[in-house]
Structures are given as structure tokens and as C-alpha cells.
Image (cartoon, grey):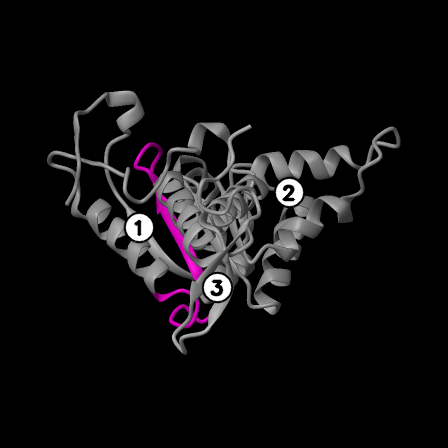
Amino acid sequence: MNICPICEGVGLVRVVDVTGKWVSRPCQCQQAEREERRIAAARIPQRYHDCTLDTYEIYHGADRSLAEALFQARRFVEEYPAGTAGKGLLFTGSIGVGKTHLAVGVLQRLVRERGVKGLFCDYRELLKNIQNSYNAQVNTTELELLKPVFAAEVLVLDDLGAQKPNDWVWDTVALVLNTRYNDRLTTIVTTNYADVPAGAGALTDAERAAREPSLGDRIGDRMLSRLAEMCIRVKMTGKDCRQTGVKRARFG
């Protein structure tokens, strides 16, 4: 077992404060341990553990929206919480442009630097677990699953709209978003769907079949409007780096 050479395992160090008095302060080793506990409590998947704002890279010739998205993510962290007023971020764009990377990067920095209690939540996995809770043989209840989602100071809701919509899905999305909206809690959302209304009434059946579904189609226009109140839109445009294998160059 390694013992900290500064505090010798006590966890406290004696320092002189601004008034000249000797006071006790938590040792850096204790601060680091608390930081790692907060990161573990955020339940960030292993795949995204290395996703930080400093490791987000932009390939040569990339659309300018990616650099703008990184800038907005960094500014959001700098201004949190006073300058963000309870608002979150809505990252939209096609697959592989780095939406989840930036969302997790913001979450990690807020947890480490601001001490927030954060949570990463995969949208499809959440809905699947809630549906499974209705099984009489499962001991976990819907409320127990949703409680940490409701309570997180900062929630990353990843891949919103990925689940095929129905009335139950729409009701569940409404419950999550409205609860967090009413409590003025910060929600960071990623989605592959365009941030536009469903527009079903203005289209024929053939036009609807040929049209790419929007976020309004997937979560309902009412919740799309709620997101507009809750989040700052960050639109990202570019190639799918995971499929094309484009060479990436660090930005900045």
C-alpha cells in the first residue's frame, strides 16, 4: 500500500491561510480520490473514458462547425453554472462527428473541475431497463431507475431519439425532460436526428416515407419545443470518421 509522502496517510495537511493562521486542508491525494469517485459515479462507459475536450481532434479540411462545437463546449464549462442559467447543450449531427465525445468531455471537466454530481445515460439502454422493470421477476422498479436520472446535477442523455417512437416512449421522454426542466437541472443531449419538427400534417404519406425522420418525429414536437428551452443548440456537420478513416489533426 502506497502512503502519501505529504500527509502520511492522514488525508490532511497543515498550511498557513491568508490571515497567517495555521489551518488544516485536505491533502491533494484525498482530493484526487474524491474526484475519481465522482467520475465513477457518473457511469461513463469504458469506451468513452478517454473522451475529454483536450483529446477532441478535428481532421484536416473538416467543416467549421466542428471547431465551433468545441469552442462552445469549452465556453459552456467556463461559464457553468452562473453563466449557463440551468441550460444545457443539444449536440446534433450525423453519425461519427464526435457528439458523444464532446458531451462526455464537458461532463468530465465539470465533474473534475467544478465538483458536480454528473451522470451518463444511454437513451436506448434507459428505456430498455425501464421496460424490463415491469417484469415481476425483476426487483428494480421504474422509480429506482429514474431517480438518479432525475437527481443528477448534470445529465448526459446520449443518442436521444434512437428508440422507435410510440406513446410509451414519448411519455417517458416527457417525464425525464419535464422533471429536469422544472428542477432547472442541466441536461446535455446528443442525437443523430435533425432538430426540426415532425411536420407530419404538411406531408403526404409518400413524402413522409421518403423523408428522413427528424427529432420531432422521434420524440414528438412538444418535447422538441421543451428541448429548445432547456438547451443551447450545437449543430455539427461532417464525415463519419469511424467509417471513412479520415486522418485527424489536432485543432488548436
Mark 3 crowd level (few <14, some 14–19, many ≥20, 10 Å Cα): many
Mark 2 or mark 1: name the one nearer the start of the chain: 2
Mark 1 crowd level (few <14, some 14–19, many ≥20, 10 Å Cα): some
Q: Where is residue 124 in the image (x, y as percent from the top left)?
A: 58, 36
Q: Which residue is drawn at 58% across and 57% down?
A: 177
Q: Are marks 2 and 1 in contact (CB under 8 Å)?
A: no
Q: Does the magenta stretch include residue 81?
A: yes
In three-dimensional space, the C-alpha distance between marks 3 and 2, rounded to whole angstroms, equals 23 Å
Q: Are marks 1 and 3 in contact (CB under 8 Å)?
A: no
190 with respect to 251 (left or right): right
Residue designated by label 1: 235
Indicate the quadrant where residue 247 lies.
top left
Which of 25/47 is in front? 25
Marker disc for residue 166: 2
Q: Is mark 1 on a helix, strand or loop?
A: strand
Q: Which residue is drawn at 41% across and 54% down?
A: 113
At label 2, the amino acid type is: Asn
41 with respect to 134 (left or right): left
Marker disc for residue 63: none
Residue designated by label 3: 230
Query: Which of the two marks, 3 or 2, is nearer to us in this view?
Result: 3
Residue interval drawn in magenta:
79-98
